Image (spheres, helix red, strand yellow):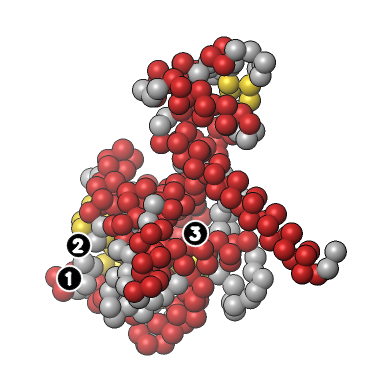
Amino acid sequence: MSVTEQQRDKLVERLFGAGLGMAEVLTVYLGDTLGLYRALRDHGAMTAPEPAKEAGILPRYAREWLEQQAAAGILTIDDASAAPDERRYQLPEGHVEPLLDPESPYSIAAFCKSFVAVAGVMPEVVAAFRSGGPVPWDSYSRDMVEAQGDFNRPWLVASFGTEYLPSIPDLHERLSNGAKVADVACGVGWAAISLARAYPNVTVDGYDLDEYSIEIARRNAAEAGVADRVTFEARDAADPTLKGAYDFATVIEAIHDLSQPVAVLGAIHEMLKPGGTLMVADERTEDAFTAPASETERLFYAYIVLCCLPSAMDDPSSAATAPSCARIRSSATRRRRGSTRSRSCRSSTTSSASTGSTASLLR
């Protein structure tokens, strides 16, 4: 077999596998969104009519989905030779955590949801490539907002306030004694909530321009029991009335998505009191472009092409930042802001699905 034929066969095999994987991602989305996995977790082995009743869907649809999930090895079946409505399907114990625990470092449902959101706007992405225009963030639907929040939730809930911040002694002391904190581009609020849980004396104000994110953030804070110390507003953090109001500010996985990152960092600088501190956490990318790249870098580039860049282009003057240049841009913005001190600390998690992040302190 020639080199060309080997390349051909390898590409076809790879894309077939990727297509099969995407098809299964879509069916996982169905199980997650419709509550089918939850029904199987709560009730154990079930025949097709039973989860259909729990989820409020047509039994015929439930049967086909259950058969597909068993064929894919996501569910198990007790007797494949039984009549269709008599087969009993079960969610394996080892699959419960990845599919149904949003705070687990192994949570994977949000990852699946994000690509469903992207798939839904592909005609708009094609049109944007041709016209040079944007795909507004709102076009990606509420699924993308929820997915992004849940994607960061495990490490923020488990580690942000209990490991990351306590590892910085002077900041830990300041937060322990009571501080006013701004969470800029707060999304659905998990950083602010984690801060409030870890430091009972702080108050946190979260700001984001996305109304739906703020709606979810307020609900999350209420459910976490910290709504008395954590507030969320759909508001521009550059509001001059916020000048000098905060001891500490955070920007979690947002700088690379902002159309004007330098301007935002300048606005946060104005929000801080003298001696205040900003923590920026963003994607942990490679130091330089490489090809072929690691799986993590390939994932980042997929998000860049399909979502980050098209949504950033909604601002005609956008800097069009992307995760692949986050570290370089962070260095450049520090220089342009005239920051006198910075500290960078790499993070990692145990999740095979997690990409990790890089956190920098600017003072």
Q: Are marks 1 and 3 in contact (CB under 8 Å)?
A: no
Query: N-terminal of the two: label 2 or label 3?
Result: 3
Q: Residues within 10 Å of mark 3 (few under 14, many from 20)?
A: some
The answer to whether residue 114 is above or below residue 298 is: above
- Spatial separation of the CA atoms under disc 1 and disc 3: 29 Å
As drawn, the label of residue 207 is none
SS for callout 2: loop
Which is closer to the viewer, label 1 or label 3? 1
- Spatial separation of the CA atoms under disc 1 and disc 2: 8 Å
Q: Is residue 123 visible?
A: yes
What is the quadrant of the C terminus in the image? bottom left
What is the quadrant of the N terminus in the image? bottom right
The answer to whether residue 263 is above or below residue 247 is: below
Q: Residue at x 32, y 78 (%)?
A: 318
In this figure, what is the number of numbered marks? 3
Residue type highlighted by circle 2: Arg
Residue 67 or residue 330, whichever sits in front? 67
Residue type highlighted by circle 1: Asp
Where residue 139 appears, as percent x and y from the top left, is 31, 57
Q: Is residue 276 visible?
A: no
Question: Badge 3 is on which residue?
Answer: 164
Q: Residue at x 39, y 64 (%)?
A: 125
Where residue 59 appears, as percent x and y from the top left, is 44, 20
Residue 66 or residue 214, whichever sits in front? 66
Question: Badge 2 is on which residue?
Answer: 235
Q: Residues within 10 Å of mark 1 (few under 14, many from 20)?
A: few
Q: Residue at x 51, y 23 (%)?
A: 63
Q: Residues within 10 Å of mark 2 (few under 14, many from 20)?
A: some
Q: Are marks 2 and 3 in contact (CB under 8 Å)?
A: no
Question: Badge 1 is on which residue?
Answer: 239
